[in-house]
Image (cartoon, helix red, strand yellow):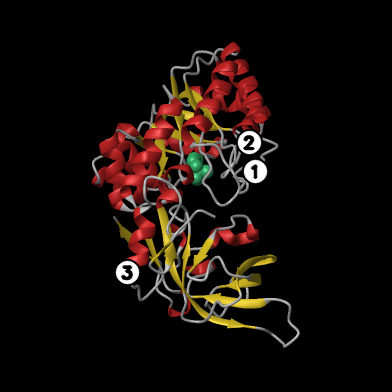
Amino acid sequence: MNATVQGAFRAPSAIPPDAAAAYIAQTSFDRPTLVIDRARVVRQYDALSEGLGAARIHYAVKANPAPEIIRLLVERGSRFDAASRAEIELCLAQGAKGSEISFGNTVKRPADIAFAYSAGVDLFVADSEAELAKLAEHAPGARIYLRVIVENSKADWPLTRKFGCAPGSVPGLLDLARDLGLRPVGLSFHVGSQTRRAEFWTPVLDQVARLWHAAIADGHPLSVLNIGGGFPAFYGEPIDAPRDYAAQVMAAVHARFGKVGYIMAEPGRGLVAEAGHIAAEVLLVSRKSQSDLHRWVYLDIGRFSGLAETEGESIRYQITTAHDGGETGPCILAGPSCDSADILYEKRPIQLPLNLRDGDRVMIRNCGAYTSSYASVGFNGFPPLDVVVL
Ligand SMILES: *Cc1c(COP(=O)(O)O)cnc(C)c1O
């Protein structure tokens, strides 16, 4: 451990300095608060862009829809992947053009399609006949890409099955799109969120490349390849730096697809997760009996107030306390609400300092993605996650 203690918290060993951690160390909060460092978002964006080469970033807005982040990314030249009218309006309000926004939700409200079309959005996803019919009616002549199911996701948070059509449906859907007057221009997939290693992409790219070349041979001149998200964040297990990771993915893409008119990538987590930490507080430390091997640690933030990705204990956040460096023991970590599902880690307990007490502040690291956007409006009267953008 080469970290030094700064204020109540360990200063991160990463260079350049971690502004969000420094801010949290110097500030007192009256509720759980996500602190996001804009400069860190820019660094991630630039690193991913470099690695992606000619592929364009369409930031997946749902990962963190803070207007300041959207504006920053507009200024940086990012494009956007939106899932609803509200997300499209957010991007437009922060200066994005309709033509720079893709509507990437396979399940769209007809009125949202019409709104998007009137706002200049010209790139829509579909994975079914009924969605193509909606698009033909409300966005006539628009460019569409088909989302395909991919197998063998090795992601920590898989995103397939619910989305995408079976590989065998691709030819029929492309024909139907054309017959409906739409312009079927490409394919998309999602390798699964938090795909920790670039090599995990290769079997997925093999599947999509087969469909891609077959469609072209079938008379559909595809030009848009949407490789989705999946770019990982650091949660304790080693990952490659964003530029290297993206470059490895792109090398694998080029090897399989050859020349493609427009390649788009939709990082969410990989762009914003490491830019934010949550300041939280221990409300209670207890044992269920004197012989209980585990302590129960209850925080003022839980599943319903921002930490939804602990579902299935899939995403394991790193937690820093003022007592780090001392002896630790296994804890079951839970949120504050009166719902017994509000347990963060139990199957695999987490190690926390033995002298952790109620009233202690903790910092949950690398939480810039999928936290503020997942917080409920006020279950049990606990306020939604507060957000501070530096
Ligand atoms: C959520 C989502 C993303 C972002 O995924 P990450 O793993 O966070 O990068 C990208 N594309 C689509 C279609 C999504 O639904």
Which residue extends farthest right? 291
Q: Classify the position of the N terminus by image quarter.
A: bottom right
Q: Which mark is residue 161?
A: 1
Q: 10 Å neighbourhood of mark 3: few (<14), some, or many (≥20)?
A: few
Q: 10 Å neighbourhood of mark 2: few (<14), some, or many (≥20)?
A: many
Depicted 8 relative to depicted 177: above or below: below
**143 left or right of 287 in image:** left
Q: Looking at the picture, which amino acid does disc 2 mark? A: Ile
Based on the displayed image, in which of its 4 quarters is residue 255 positioned?
top right
Residue occupying image coordinates x 72% and y 88% = 290
Q: Secondary structure at mark 1?
A: loop
Based on the displayed image, in which of its 4 quarters is residue 262 positioned?
top left
Which residue extends farthest bottom? 290
Q: Looking at the picture, which amino acid does disc 3 mark? A: Thr
Distance between mark 2 and mark 1 Cα atoms: 6 Å
Q: Which residue is mark 3?
A: 27
Distance between mark 2 and mark 3 Cα atoms: 46 Å
Q: 10 Å neighbourhood of mark 1: few (<14), some, or many (≥20)?
A: few
Earlier sequence position, callout 1 versus callout 3: 3
Q: Are marks 2 and 1 in contact (CB under 8 Å)?
A: yes
Q: Is mark 2 within 8 Å of ligand 1?
A: no
Q: Which residue is mark 2?
A: 149
Camera-side residue of 13 and 59? 13
Earlier sequence position, callout 2 versus callout 3: 3
Q: Give the x, y percent position of residue 214.
A: 63, 16
